[in-house]
Amino acid sequence: MKQEIIDFAREKFVEAPGEEVLGDEIRKYQQIHLAVAFMGEDYREKARIKIAKQAIANGCEWAVDGDYCQDHYMSKSVILAATGLRKTPKKRIIKPIFPKKIISHISDEEFLSRMGENPEDYDSINLAAEYLGSKYVEMAEIRLARIALRAKCKWVTQMDYVFHNPKKNYVRIKAKGLIKKF
């Protein structure tokens, strides 16, 4: 295993909010949703390494807001979610990359604040999606993003993995879709 991935997992993956780690500097970063499912021995540590690998592959300098969702000690399985942070290009990106840049598991207020948006400019709707099959976490998130886009949502926040069965490759997620008022 590459030492770079191990070092990132130890030093650059944090469970704390990004504002605690970077302060106002966080606004200089793009937010990328990261999530992995893992089942087996040392499941939490190995999930951290998978998140680090995913973060590095997406050009992230940090993985913050770490959240061990659906952490099942008895079955040694977990879904680990985080917000990957990578430097924002000098040109502002108008349309987000589908779907990693429109989804977040953090609150809408915190997400919009990082994006330089006013939460009062958005209405919200409840969203849900599920998926059964290989790459079930990734595919459920893609399904959720498609549902959100059909509903005219600009962003998806407060995503939560409400049910996870790693033996059957199944996950159910819910979230809040944000629609620009004007």
Image: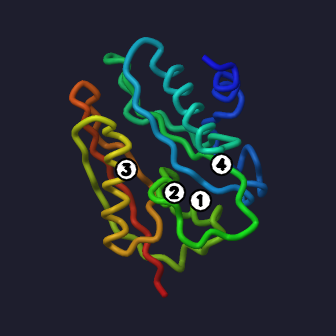
Report how far apart the C-alphas of labels 1 and 3 lie in the structure.
Answer: 20 Å
Camera-nearest residue between 33 and 67: 33
Camera-nearest residue between 98 and 155: 98
- SS state under label 4: strand
| Camera-nearest label, 4 or 1 | 4
Look at label 2 and name its amino acid: Ser
Task: Count neighbours of disc 4 (C-alpha within 10 A) and say few if under 14, some if 14 to 19, many if 20 or more.
Answer: many
Tag on residue 110? 1
The residue singled out by tag 4 in the image is 85
Look at 23% across and 37% down and name the residue there.
133
Dot 1 or dot 3: first in sequence order is 1
In the image, taking residue 46 as reference, residue 27 lies left or right, namely right
- Contact between labelled residues 3 and 1, with CB atoms less than 8 Å apart: no
Dot 4 or dot 3: first in sequence order is 4
Tag on residue 89? none
Q: Position of residue 28 (x, y in %)?
A: 74, 59
